[in-house]
Amino acid sequence: MTDHSRIGEVLSTLDEELPRALDRLVEFLRIPSISTDPAYKGEVRRAAEWLCAELTSLGFEAGLRDTPGHPMVVAHSPKGTRRPLLFYGHYDVQPVDPLDLWERPPFEPQIEDTPQGKVIRGRGASDDKGQLMTFVEAFRAWKAVHGSLPSDLVLLFEGEEESGSPSLRPFLRENAEELRAGVAMICDTGLYADGRPAITTQLRGLYGDEIVLRAADRDLHSGSFGGLAANPIQVLVDALSTIKDATGRVTLPGFYDGVEELSGELRADWDALGFDPGEFLSRVGLKHPIGEQGRTGLEMVWNRPTFEINGITGGYTGDGFKTVLPAEARAKVSFRLTGAQDPERIREAFRAHIRAHVPADCTVEFHGHGASPASRMDISDPAFTAAKAALSQEWGREAAYIGAGGSIPIAGDFKEILGMDSMLIGFARDDDRIHSPNEKYDLDSFAKGARSWARILAALG
Amino acid sequence: MTDHSRIGEVLSTLDEELPRALDRLVEFLRIPSISTDPAYKGEVRRAAEWLCAELTSLGFEAGLRDTPGHPMVVAHSPKGTRRPLLFYGHYDVQPVDPLDLWERPPFEPQIEDTPQGKVIRGRGASDDKGQLMTFVEAFRAWKAVHGSLPSDLVLLFEGEEESGSPSLRPFLRENAEELRAGVAMICDTGLYADGRPAITTQLRGLYGDEIVLRAADRDLHSGSFGGLAANPIQVLVDALSTIKDATGRVTLPGFYDGVEELSGELRADWDALGFDPGEFLSRVGLKHPIGEQGRTGLEMVWNRPTFEINGITGGYTGDGFKTVLPAEARAKVSFRLTGAQDPERIREAFRAHIRAHVPADCTVEFHGHGASPASRMDISDPAFTAAKAALSQEWGREAAYIGAGGSIPIAGDFKEILGMDSMLIGFARDDDRIHSPNEKYDLDSFAKGARSWARILAALG
């Protein structure tokens, strides 16, 4: 068992070491590890090597593990009797274009004073190098105080997160025994909107599909054929408009199988967030929630499944006008999934619905784009309660269990391949401009983030 | 009164003169009068001058009339006591690209033997120089036999038909007194599909509109906003899918006001055409007519109004997938109109329907693209009966009154601005490849076309 009295020393060490920790982060951020651009392949590897050297210096048994893409960094602390914990982050970053919108070079990070406090600005500061280093600095301070690392830690740092993680699932499968832990810590998320610390305990799943509907073997003139020949845009529009009813519910048979109502505990946490959907929408020029009747705003985005048309195209879309009956129309659609909804069954129901709308001499083709179920963590695991308490203590306000409307595929992958739940805890803020020019990370997020992990390590000890 | 016995002489003259007539047509076709390309401005004018000289040599009082675009050629035969007839054609041609698909230079026409008979091949051979010259050769032969032109002819040959006729309506308005006649002859159409001579007596009108639907002030992530924020594609799809019901009828209030059932006479003619919608559709890879229940194929394309979505776009339409909730979605739609349907009322009903589907915080913008009512000729005018009989005699088979599913704006313009009906009579064939490489016109169409006009002139004398 960890000596709880020493957490104070670990936190003091973190505070004292903050300037050095920032120097290290700056050094890490100076490596342009843009994973999606082959021109930066060497730099991505250099970032992995930098990280590996840091971890080795702390006493981890760390190494680069080659994949068909960029390497994984895997590290282990000494074996012991703790419940193993896996820490996941990524060391690659997004491209920087448009470069001319950056106020300073994206890979020459610096500390800036802003009206909202000090920030470190540069590509990757928040997503995800700054967050990843909150782990590393917590381990370092722990080592400094205790003389040794916490035992039974597994670190997995990926270099392809910003380019679709093509190697991740095969790597998890091939190294399942080595990587499996009691629970995973994922640092790729943020504080709740108002700065409240939060643990994301459920994420919606996703099923995406593309429909290609073909009618005549060429574009037709609507004067010669209009009224007689099938118009694939009309067929598509009719098929898509019947997927939701007037109350916003999806009409596909069996669609709601597995969808679960919110538990009392989560509902209380979510209600306490004081989410105002009108205010939320007003930031993007809207006012009125358009989701299912009788649901709160947070239910709509976190706990209810959706159907969305993400793209549609057909016929003449240029300037002016062309009275064409097109040969083809296309749509990209996606379903956000919750609870135990089965993406495969939804795929079947969706495709059957579309096919039922397609006239005899039209054809339809589907191109699936991913199918992942929703992730729901088991919050009865005492690790969740302990982490939540640690976060509340560090930030001086009650931490909340929250949901996420989007998918974080890694959480689903850990569940599916390694059979473990994830705690998604991060300290990014809504205004961090991740993926955009002038990305930043608050020094407060960095400092209190590292302190949070130290407390969580102690609490789970 | 014309001496009817001399029509035989006129026809013989046409037959004897055919080689010279073809030489003239070749000369005319050698002028690259591409109206849409400013580089050919001088050539367009040269074609007008060539035509004007031909007409003057026949005894017409002919002249070029300048417009903001290309000139009109207007010619008059001597005043007399006939009911005035206006003849309309156009001397400009389509561009020739893709040039590499032409088997010979498009402006070096020649007579070719084909398995289907002799043709003259070159840009404009069918559309519309060849057809226009069927008028001119008929006048020439008439003059040769009678010593003078038929009286009371007005010729209007346009040089902007292939570039949208921007000067036509103003020109008609400014010269209405001069151009108004009892009936107009328009030579810009074809034989019926099987080669039967035909007079087009009704054309569908058109109302086009573009819808721009806007929701949020930026593209949104469907994970963060899906289920809560309005999706303009869904709004658009829902609005468009309710414009037609399951039987193919348009649901807009008052939409069918003014639509007329086919008269017994037209129905008999149309039935006699033996139109097989399945066969017609099979040429473009379809089989099943998709129009209003209980209507014949020809009714669907000629006598029933339609609603068509001609183009739609919104969200992400590139390769791969993007879970975006777009800020905007657009559609271009058109209605083909029949009978006395009023485009303005249909515009109002359509826009009211769309607006009723738009949620409070979305906006919709419309961009109208033309509104023209259907054209229906008064076939109780004896000129129609006479022309139909003349055509039947020349072609050795019963001529038919037919409809057209598309608009020929000139017919509507003549009706609206000059108050006169048009007889649309032409000799083009479906395989003439107008607007495409290797355009041709059958010598048979040219020779019998000129003979047809001679007969019609005699019959209307």
Image (spheres, coloured by chain):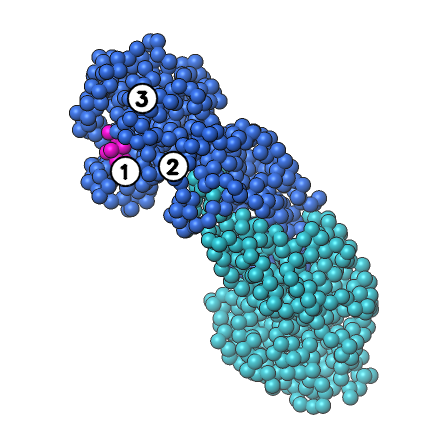
Chain colours: A cyan, B blue
- Viewport quadrant of the N terminus of chain A: bottom right
Stretch of the chain drawn in magenta: B441-447
The chain under label 1 reads: B
Q: Give left or right: position of A355 versus B46.
A: right
Q: CA distance from mark 3 to mark 1?
A: 25 Å
Residue indicated by mark 1: B440
Q: Residue at x 58, y 79 (%)?
A: A172
Q: CA distance from mark 1 to mark 2?
A: 25 Å
Can you tell which mark lies on residue B456? 3
- Whether the residues at callouts 3 and 1 have beta carbons within 8 Å, the answer is no
State whether residue B165 is above or below residue B244.
Answer: above
Please state which of residues A118 and A80 is positioned toward the viewer in this rendering.
A80
Give the amino acid at mark 2: Leu
State whether residue B147 is above or below residue B200.
Answer: above
Based on the picture, tell me whether residue B442 belongs to the magenta stretch.
yes
State whether residue B63 is above or below residue B26.
Answer: above
Residue A102 appears in the rendering: no
The 10 Å Cα crowd at callout 1, few under 14, some 14 to 19, many 20 or more, is many
Give the amino acid at mark 3: Ile
Residue indicated by mark 2: B273
Please state which of residues B389 and A282 is positioned toward the viewer in this rendering.
B389
Residue B431, x across and y down, in percent: 31, 41
Q: Residue at x 19, y 40 (%)?
A: B113
Residue A217, x across and y down, in percent: 41, 51
* Secondary structure beneath label 1: strand
Q: Residue at x 58, y 65 (%)?
A: A348
Closer mark to the observer between disc 3 and disc 1: 3
